[in-house]
């Protein structure tokens, strides 16, 4: 099972960016999916999460600016980030609770991070 994230980059303040993360491998089911971020010298923090049914949760710092969504058929989670500011600069990691076809429970999986830099 693998999570692969795409979409990071360098943008100016006020710009938008869309991250995506696709799960692949022997997957039977995916429950919650989410995005975390870790700024330099800081602890990793939850940015947003979404259940298999579409219920969402956001960090206060991104409410109204970021939108998380998912495509269950494509096993992909997205993070639309608008009105980016320098405080959003961090490595963004996707996360998913996945039941493999060979397993009997859900296991937490992490993707490799993708760097988002917001700077003028």
Image (cartoon, grey):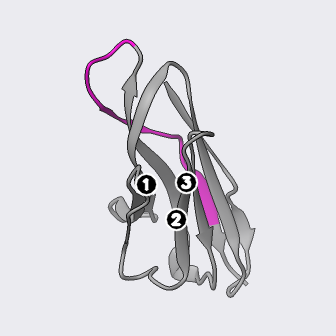
At x 64%, y 69%, the residue is: 117
Q: Indicate left or right for 103 with 38 as reference.
A: left
State which quarter of the image contains the C terminus: bottom right
- Proximity of marks 1 and 2: CB atoms separated by less than 8 Å: yes
Query: SS for tag 2?
Result: strand
Question: Which stretch appears magenta?
Answer: 102-116
Pointer 2: what residue? 68
Residue 70: mark: 3
Q: Position of residue 105 (x, y in %)?
A: 26, 25
Q: Position of residue 54 (x, y in %)?
A: 44, 59
- Proximity of marks 2 and 3: CB atoms separated by less than 8 Å: yes
**Between tags 1 and 3, which lies in front?**
3
Q: Position of residue 65 (x, y in %)?
A: 55, 82
Tell me which label, 1 or 3, sits earlier in the chain.
1
Q: Is residue 72 magenta?
A: no
Residue 34: mark: 1
Relative to residue 85, is residue 116 depicted above or below? above
At x 67%, y 64%, the residue is: 18
Q: Quadrant of residue 7?
A: bottom right
Relative to residue 87, is residue 53 depicted above or below? above
Query: SS for tag 3?
Result: strand
Mark 1: few/some/many CA within 10 Å (<14, 14-19, 20+): many
């Amino acid at each position: 099972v693998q999570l692969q994230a795409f979409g990071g980059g360098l943008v100016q303040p006020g710009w938008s960016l869309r991250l995506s993360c696709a799960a692949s491998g022997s997957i039977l089911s995916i429950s919650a999916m989410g995005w975390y971020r870790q700024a330099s010298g800081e602890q990793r923090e939850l940015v947003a999460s979404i259940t298999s049914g579409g219920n969402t949760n956001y960090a206060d710092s991104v409410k109204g600016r970021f939108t998380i969504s998912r495509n269950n058929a494509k096993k992909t989670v997205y993070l639309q980030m608008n009105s980016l500011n320098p405080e959003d600069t961090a490595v963004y990691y996707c996360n998913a609770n996945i039941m493999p076809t060979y397993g009997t429970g859900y296991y937490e999986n992490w993707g490799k991070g993708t760097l988002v830099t917001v700077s003028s």
